Image: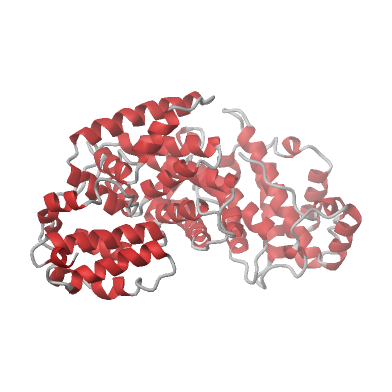
């Protein structure tokens, strides 16, 4: 388990007095239990199964009563850094419920760390503490953790991060794939964690929809923890998680103000890599990886090379995708198969061969990087040998990563004009080129304009087809673009769409 950063008011915890806090509605025995736990090591408090359950329920009750339903605390929730002792104690006086909320989250985290460190065969475990002995169901007292996640206003970063992290580890205990699930000394009803796990993942994906790095910091510790659990990986993928991760990785390579930090890029890449482990057993996850442009995001990450640890995990994810197969879980007969060959074509289209060739010339201290580069180099070059020039062009257009080269020349379009019809005669490649004229990359826009113009020149009735697909109106808007190179290619493309005999004019 990764460490939970300390609460901003951690220095006030020793000053908490339970008797005056009537709002918590604690019994005398519950207050005694809290005091006793505070004066003893945590492993002593959790040494007995019955007392362990009782203490956990008291801590969760404190969280339930202190966090309430009225939203985040008035002062503590806004704190960003740790206060010195005198300021923290003053905060205990002005916002006691805020301090107690942080106290409960911290204690619950300490409980989970202690229980997960217990050796196998211990009488006190995560399962015996958080699941009822009679029916094996998850204890009802878990619900305040979910409520903390949905605090209104600006929320409470420490409480939300801690609640999500604790809830994830509690719920994973109840998943069939986890080690505790096969411990026959204690029976768990796995269905009791299904809805809570889906609720947690829904909250995570809602945070990932934001483009800000602050939202990422709330969820990445929890998400990296969940990725060790196959049930959580499947639920996250089914909730659109791969698409959200891919978008954040793409934004992270642009270096914008709100883009992810290097550590966040590493954690996001780790999650993508973990998800690739489901590719062989799940056709839907392979299809999702293909649909959500995960390869494009990973290649961008490798090419920008933010840090060696980020490159390592991105290369591992690409290798896993390149080697996946559909033997166990093929796509439905009505859909095109997606497997390692599909992803290799996409990698070639994104220009990964060039980056891998360059990276193999460098001296790497990490043997995993060296091995991944060797494997990818062989797979990419073997696949490239089997691809026609049109296959390579199609992969590049579908990836959206256009680069000037032999694929964007008059000779190529003369030889391949007929291929633009597509297998269904719908000119889908031309449609992709039209879409790429609105790319955020000005070079990609310029190449798309050039290619549309060359298609118009070399395909019979290409002018009418391009116009019917809206190419003329979209490209016309780029004629006044401030980028002179893009402006030139846009003007040339529009001219080719308007002139009957371009060669004669040219």
Residue at x 42%, y 33% (from the top left corner): 358
Q: In this view, does 105 lie above or below 273?
A: below
Horizontal side of 42 relative to 345 (left or right) equals right
Residue 174 visible to the viewer: no
Q: In this view, does 454 lie above or below 416?
A: below
Residue at x 88%, y 54% (from the top left corner): 15
Residue 441 locus on image (x, y percent): 41, 59
Quadrant in which the N terminus is drawn: top right
Q: Nearer the viewer, residue 196 or 279?
A: 279
Residue furthest left as drawn? 460
The image's colour scheme reads: secondary structure
The quadrant in which residue 330 appears is top left
The quadrant in which residue 348 appears is top left
Quadrant in which the C terminus is drawn: bottom left
Q: Nearer the viewer, residue 179 or 263?
A: 263
Residue 306 locus on image (x, y percent): 54, 42
Residue 352 locus on image (x, y percent): 36, 40
Residue 246 locus on image (x, y percent): 43, 52
The quadrant in which residue 316 appears is top left
């Amino acid at each position: 388990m990764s460490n939970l950063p300390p609460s901003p008011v951690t220095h006030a915890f020793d000053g908490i007095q339970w008797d005056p806090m009537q709002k918590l509605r604690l019994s005398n025995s519950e207050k005694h239990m809290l005091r006793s736990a505070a004066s003893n090591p945590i492993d002593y408090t959790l040494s007995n199964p019955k007392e362990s359950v009782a203490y956990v329920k008291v801590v969760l009750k404190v969280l339930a009563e202190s966090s309430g339903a009225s939203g985040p605390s008035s002062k503590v929730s806004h704190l960003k850094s740790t206060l010195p002792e005198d300021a923290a104690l003053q905060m205990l006086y002005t916002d006691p419920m805020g301090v107690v909320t942080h106290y409960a989250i911290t204690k619950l985290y300490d409980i989970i760390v202690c229980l997960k460190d217990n050796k196998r065969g211990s009488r006190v475990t995560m399962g015996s503490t958080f699941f009822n002995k009679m029916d094996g169901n998850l204890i009802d007292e878990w619900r305040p953790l979910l409520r903390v996640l949905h605090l209104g206003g600006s929320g409470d970063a420490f409480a939300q991060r801690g609640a999500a992290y604790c809830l994830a580890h509690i719920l994973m205990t109840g998943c069939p794939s986890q080690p505790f699930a096969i411990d026959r000394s204690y029976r768990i009803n796995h269905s009791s964690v299904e809805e809570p796990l889906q609720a947690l993942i829904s909250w995570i994906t809602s945070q990932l929809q934001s483009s800000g790095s602050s939202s990422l910091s709330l969820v990445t510790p929890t998400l990296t923890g969940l990725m060790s659990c196959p049930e959580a990986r499947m639920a996250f993928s089914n909730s659109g998680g791969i698409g959200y991760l891919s978008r954040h990785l793409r934004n992270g390579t642009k270096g914008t103000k709100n883009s992810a930090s290097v550590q966040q890029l590493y954690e996001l890449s780790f999650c993508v890599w973990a998800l690739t482990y489901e590719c062989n057993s799940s056709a839907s996850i392979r299809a999702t990886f293909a649909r959500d442009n995960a390869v494009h995001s990973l290649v961008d990450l490798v090419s920008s090379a933010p840090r060696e640890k980020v490159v390592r995990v991105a290369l591992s994810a690409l290798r896993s995708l390149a080697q996946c197969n559909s033997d166990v879980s093929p796509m439905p007969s009505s859909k095109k198969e997606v497997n390692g060959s599909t992803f290799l074509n996409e990698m070639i289209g994104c220009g990964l061969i060039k980056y891998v060739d360059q990276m193999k010339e460098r001296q790497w201290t990490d043997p995993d990087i060296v091995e991944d580069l060797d494997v990818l180099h062989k797979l990419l070059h073997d696949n490239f040998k089997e691809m026609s020039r049109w296959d390579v062009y199609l992969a590049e257009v579908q990836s959206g990563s256009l680069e000037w080269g032999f694929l964007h020349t008059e000779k190529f379009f003369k030889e391949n004009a007929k291929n633009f019809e597509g297998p269904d005669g719908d000119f889908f490649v031309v449609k992709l080129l039209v879409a790429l004229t609105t790319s955020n990359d000005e070079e990609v826009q310029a190449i798309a304009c050039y290619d549309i113009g060359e298609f118009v020149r070399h395909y019979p009735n290409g002018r009418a087809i391009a116009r019917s697909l809206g190419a003329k109106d979209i490209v016309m808007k780029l004629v006044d673009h401030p980028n002179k190179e893009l402006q030139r290619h846009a003007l040339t493309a529009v001219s080719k769409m308007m002139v009957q005999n371009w060669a004669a004019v040219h």
